[in-house]
Amino acid sequence: MSLPHVPGHEFAGEIAEIGSQVSRFALGERVTVPFVVGCGRCEWCRSGQAQVCPDQTQPGFTQAGSFAEQVAIGAADFNLVRLPDELDYVTQDMVIAIQRDEQKHRRLFEGFLRELCPDEVR
């Protein structure tokens, strides 16, 4: 990470600009992004494993994050996630944090169970 740097990795907002290759989203839509922003093209991204994408970025770490006035997200059609109107931005951040931890713990627990009971857990 080079300085100066703008931190912040969990965020949501409204689309202010759209690149020419974006077709699934419109100006003004409320969106969020995953912690890891994948390229959307490699085998890892296509299989749902963007966290190991060789061309990934991480807002707040490898690029400007949520404390910036605006954040550009590559492969927007792949990475953006629409937010329901009923969900405010603060609640959305909490949901993403809980979901990320829940997924991580579930994977760890499943791995632990596979080691203990290899014939029972697949």
Image (cartoon, grey):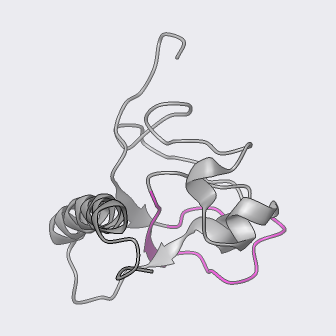
Q: Position of residue 96 (x, y in %)?
A: 28, 65
Q: Is residue 8 magenta?
A: no
Asked whether, in this view, residue 13 is left or right of residue 46, the answer is left
Relative image position of residue 88 (x, y in whole percent)? 20, 75
Hey, which residue is sitting farthest top in the picture? 3
Which portion, as a residue range, is magenta? 15-34
- The rendered magenta stretch, by its main secondary structure, is classed as loop
> Residue at left 17%, top 63%?
94
Q: Is residue 16 visible?
A: yes
Q: What residue is drawn where x is 43% and y is 39%?
A: 65
At x 31% / y 71%, what residue is drawn? 117
Q: Nearer the viewer, residue 87 or 121?
A: 121
Q: Depth check: 15 or 46 in front? A: 46
Image point (52%, 17%), residue name:
1
- The percent position of residue 76, horizontal first and vertical second, equals 66, 65
Residue 44 falls in image quadrant = bottom right
Whether residue 40 is visible here, answered yes or no, is no
